[in-house]
Amino acid sequence: MAVSKEEMAVVDVVDELIKTIIIPSFPEKEYSIMDFGAIPDGITDNTEAIKNTIAKCAEGGGGKVIVPPGKFLTGPIHLKSNVNFHIQEGAEILFTKDKGAYLPVVHTSYEGVELMNYSPLIYAYKQKNIAITGRGILNGQADNTNWWPWCGSSRYGHKDGEPKQRDEHNLPRLRIMNEEGTPVAERIFGEGHNLRPTFVEPFECENVLIQGVTITNAPFWVIHPIKSNNVTVDGVSVNSHGPNNDGCNPEYARNVHITNCIFNTGDDCIAIKSGRNEDGRRVNIPSENIIIENCIMKDGHGGVVIGSEISAGVRNVYVRNCKMDSPNLERAIRIKTNTLRGGFVENVYVKNIVIGQVKEAVLKINTYYGIYENQEGDFIPTIKNINLENIQVANGGKYGILIKGREENPIQGISLKNVHIKGAEIAISIENSEPIHYSETTINGKSYE
């Protein structure tokens, strides 16, 4: 098959973009948490030992903080500039179930809205050159008795009468603060509220590396680089099936490289965000230059998803050389928004993807997304230039292609080249989209040109 100049240009753009993403480097100095009193028995609280080791490393100009083999119980870990937090193979960090350990509240985010809340389990705020590396395990210890019940679902341990995130003083209150533009410093939650923390959150950071570790049992979103630039997520395994356990959610993030990872999740494997409603429009930082390659997506609501918290927009997303396959994977590529979110999605390139099985659709674009409450507003989303190429699908689920655009602003510029979908119950369902450009494409054996 001949390769066009346009295709080569996209490949060149991606390769050059990867070269520009700064991967942090560190001085050849090591600081073991054992030297600061850590005890690997899975029972002793090592919060202070880890905190003091990180502080000493940072004060010394940076280096590698070593977590040796063993089980280490701790509260939240706050990283500092020029520190590589290295969890050796055979080491497991257990994050305490004591909610009070995640206080005082810090500047963080919940479902695309900034607030002051429980600290993420691993948090970095306005730091530069930071890393989490090694072959060890990060275990959030969330389960049907810890963190998860707050989602309000009996499936995750919630019982009638117990507190949940949708109680009036929790999410509904945050939604009102979002609508009214309440200053973030006044959006105080934490103790007495029931909004779960993210797991790994670099917030306004530069030059971030997360490499090699396994992350499991997350309270909420797993890897959440927000307002951060130059982020590399390499060789990470996410195996976490709790509520809202998205694998990696870049938000207001730029120059992000996600590669060689395995995502087996209770929600979207990768979901690119840019703020919810008024908050997204206030911050107004599009997520852009996101590269996803050589990854495996197993269970999840979607393989690579854009939205639904997308009000500042997303552009320049490149997905290539990935495998997606699970009877519990809902969609392969998904874009979701509505007229409260608004926002834009443009320049998405998906290439060389092997898909075994999905439940609902290979490509789903939905501008009427909503799971509760009214989701209609005055912000008509724009979606354009979505390209799929060299996609092989063994079992397409209910739909091959499912698109639901808006009459006021139809979806533009969808292109399918060398896409072959088998086993879809319904080949195509399209509303309010400009005609799709097909080339060398088949669905259920029927040729589309």
Image (tube, rainbow, N blue to C red):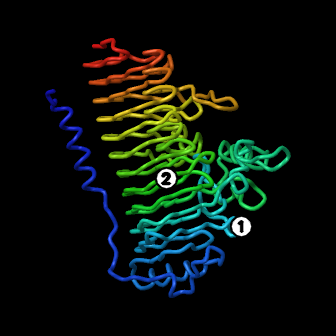
What residue did someone put label 1 on?
98
The residue sitting at 68% across, 68% down in the picture is 103
The residue sitting at 52% across, 51% down in the picture is 239
Residue 167 drawn at (x, y percent): 78, 45
Left or right: residue 447 compared with residue 42: left
Residue 328 drawn at (x, y percent): 53, 35
Q: Quadrant of residue 93?
A: bottom right
What residue did someone put label 2 on?
238
The residue sitting at 58% across, 28% down in the picture is 378
Can residue 8 be seen here? The reply is yes
Left or right: residue 113 compared with residue 164: left
Left or right: residue 193 compared with residue 237: right
Question: Would you say the residues marked 2 and 1 are in contact, meaning their CB atoms lie under 8 Å apart?
Answer: no
Which kind of residue does numbered mark 1 sit on? Asp
**Mark 1 or mark 2, which is nearer the start of the sequence?**
1
Task: Please name which of the two marks, 2 or 1, marks the residue nearer to the observer.
Answer: 2
176 w.r.t. 389: above or below: below
Q: Residues within 10 Å of mark 1 (few under 14, many from 20)?
A: few
Can residue 291 be seen here? The reply is no
